[in-house]
Image (tube, rainbow, N blue to C red):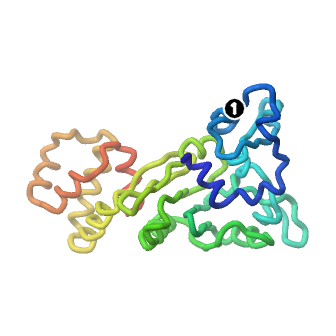
Amino acid sequence: MDGIDFLWQYATSPMADEMQLLDVNDSNEPISCYCCGRPSGEWSAPQYQMRVDSYINVEVPICAPCNSLFHGSYKYLGIEKGTPDKPGAPGKLGMLVGCGLIVTQKQNMLLTNPGWDKRLRVATNPLFELLQVSGKGALEYACQRILELSDDEFPLLYISDIGRKKAELVANLKLTHSKAQIRVCSSDSAFRINTELLHAIRTMQQDDKNGWKKLATFIFSSCHGRIAPNDEGLHSFLSANPEALAIARSLPADPHEKLQLLKVV
């Protein structure tokens, strides 16, 4: 299942009662979603809404699952602007910059900062449990919450930052199928966290802080092309440190995923 369909099925579909949705079966022309690019035959819900693209000033079809990112709702998402007494604009899921989201088959958790938390709590029928967790510790918190879930709550969807770039976010939505490997999604990237590797790094951080700092420096430098894979200093360090060698061998091949991992730890 596509990530955006999973989000719709387990979290955002109640908003359909407010949307001006059209049935694809009533159209004589083939329809593809302007946001995700999928033809209507691949949508989990055979409905869409016509929206105006403000950049080209043309009406475009948005499938119901993607439309949940565009739809403004006082009822489900509180306010985006204004105050509870004088709301200026309804809240939109696809505008929650800095907020994270964990959606499982049993529960939905929105990780917010104090500003968004206050505005989201205006909602009379909220879609998510609100948790004030933001900043550098949000990713670590989310990973820990995912590890504490029961096996029957997988697969799940984890978005580290919802942001504003909706089409880019939809393209990067990947499901996490087990605790062994967490998929972290945002509009900027989708990367994997090997939880066994993460545990090994945590252990090294506690048992050998200086060794971990040196290894992290080597990883960072190699990802940026500052040292070659056959660097003598790196090989000498790994030869003398079996824990570091085991971690190095378990690192993802993609340098971008390596750098994202360093941000987590």
Which residue was labeled with disc 1?
32
**Left or right: 234, with 24 as reference point:** left
Q: Residue furthest right?
A: 86
231 or 157: which is nearer to us?
Answer: 157
**Left or right: 177, with 133 as reference point:** left
258 in relation to 61, above or below: below
Q: Position of residue 110 (x, y in %)?
A: 62, 66
Q: Secondary structure at mark 1?
A: loop
147 in relation to 3, above or below: below
Seen at 84% across and 64% down, the residue is 82
**Left or right: 92, with 174 as reference point:** right
Q: Position of residue 81 (x, y in %)?
A: 81, 61
The amino acid at mark 1 is Ser
Seen at 82% across and 57% down, the residue is 17
239 in relation to 129, above or below: above
Classed neighbour count for the residue bearing mark 1: other residues with Cα under 10 Å, few (<14), some (14–19), many (≥20) = many
Q: Position of residue 92 (x, y in %)?
A: 75, 56
**Left or right: 136, with 227 as reference point:** right
100 in relation to 191, above or below: below
Q: Residue furthest front?
A: 25
